[in-house]
Amino acid sequence: MALLTPTAERIEASDAALASLPGFSNHEPGANEFAVLDPSTEQRIATLPSRDPAWAVEQLGVADEAGRAWAKTTPRHRSETLHRVYDVLIGQRERLAFVISREMGKTLAEANGEVQYAADYVRWYADELLRPAGNFRENPAGGSTILTRRSPIGLSVLIAPWNFPMAMITRKIAPALAAGCGAVIKPASLTPLTTLLTVELMVEAGVPRELMRVVTTKDSGGFSEAVLADPRVRKVSFTGSTGVGSTLLGLAAKNVIKSSMELGGNAPLIVFDDADLERAVEGAIQAKLRNGGQSCIAANRIYVQDGIADAFVEGVTERMAAIKLGHAIAEGTDLGPVIDRRAVDNFSALVADAVDHGAELRTGGSAVPGEGYFFEATVLDRVPSDSLIANTEIFGPVAAISRFGTQEEVLAAANDTPFGLAGYVFTESLDRALNVADALETGLVGINNGVPSNPAAPFGGLKQSGLGREGSGEGLEEYQEIRFYNISRRESN
Ligand code: NAD
């Protein structure tokens, strides 16, 4: 299969965006450095320092002190600063999108979408912070009034994954800054460049540099052990796999650090016979292929009812077979590379196992030979429940479709997992949509909607998919402590 490749002009423009990064360098990495690769080419695109745990702990001091000063600024000041950040990020959209595409591999169109999505969190919190929630309560026995209020939780540690290198950072840093907290940020070592540029632009927009300290390192374990043992840290917010999240919760337990965990998913997408076929196919393609399938809310198990199954599988297969694979920044690319070689090998193994167990391969199914980490958009039909793919977070462009007869049967299958992040239901019946959404054990449900995330929505998982919420007012509360003053009153004359 021939891959689409970028024009010289696009390569030059994206190289210029990379070269504009603060402290940019691209030499053979030394002992305390690491390389960032372009997954479209496997070529090195930057070299960064791998900071040791002692350096990270020093940054805690810097961010803590700056955070204490920031907490004293007025809500209006913080709001106006964040609005300026929004404007600067959107003004630099093209530069950010090039960096995202080059280091992470999503198409330029999707990278542009991520910049908007990421900036939208900043704008949401710029507005939300002006309306701090608090209230008065009366002592039922009389004699006192209780005043509740929110204060910033304090020094926060923010750890992000590689799949949305900008949005997963702003979804944490925006509410942290809105609440009045300083932060130490650890981007994924596969995609640190977007974070460095985002934070630099935030500084340009007026956020004090000391408030947001970025630690690039390949020693993730050493980093988290050191910072989470530090008594100044009051909050850890992590997005990534359930395994790492569980380790971090263990570390956070020692100092009783408030924790938000956005972890892995295994989303069911359910299509009923009465669904609008076109809408269901479109929704399934979006929920499957957004970000090349590398999304924690990606449709992992697609269940389609018998009466509509043949038409649905045909529709999805036609769309997937037409997907054009290419370098992330090439014009016309629908699907870029996945993040690394390990992911490609994993998809090959999952497809082989599914076919061994009786699944039918409708399109795709193979890795693309040559440089870059490419895997074809793939559709498997009649995937049995005991195959590996039905029980694993795929995190790639492989649609695993199973067929079902009744609502009861599909709900039992959909909830038969320790994960509970997202679910999807496609039906034209409002009763069925709401009944199924209620019965799904997931933190969010897309109803006739393949793209449910939104800055105004409290994103987060049930079961082993996480703790806490990001986005919306609930996302701000993650960076706040609720306190009360009980004010005694007695008669005066
Ligand atoms: P990962 O858990 O391997 O890594 C996430 C981040 O943690 C990276 O920055 C990594 O460097 C760091 N890390 C790894 N070990 C660490 C340790 N011991 N201490 C501190 N940091 C450590 O996950 P990933 O492969 O980068 O991302 C994919 C996973 O993330 C998937 O499971 C996906 O579902 C999940 N995810 C969840 C959400 C969500 O909001 N629920 C969003 C995006 C991704």
Image (cartoon, grey):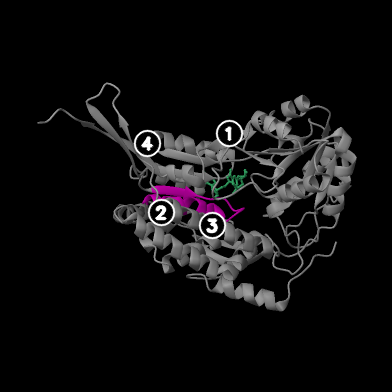
Mark with earlier residue (2, 4): 2
Tell me the CA gap for discs 3 and 2.
15 Å
- In the displayed structure, does residue 61 sit left or right of residue 249? left
Q: Is residue 405 above or below residue 319?
A: above
Q: Are marks 2 and 1 in contact (CB under 8 Å)?
A: no
Mark 1 secondary-structure assignment = strand
- The residue pinned by badge 4 equals 255
Residue 418 place in picture, x, y as percent:
63, 30
Specify the label residue 462 is tagged with.
1
Specify the label residue 73 is tagged with.
none
| Residue sitting nearer the eye, 298 or 439 | 439
Magenta-highlighted residues: 156-181
Residue 464 place in picture, x, y as percent:
58, 33
| Residue sitting nearer the eye, 116 or 136 | 136
User: Around disc 4, counting alpha carbons within 10 Å, would you say few (fewer than 14), some (14 to 19), or many (20 or more)?
Assistant: some
Look at label 1 and name its amino acid.
Leu
Tell me the CA gap for discs 3 and 4.
33 Å
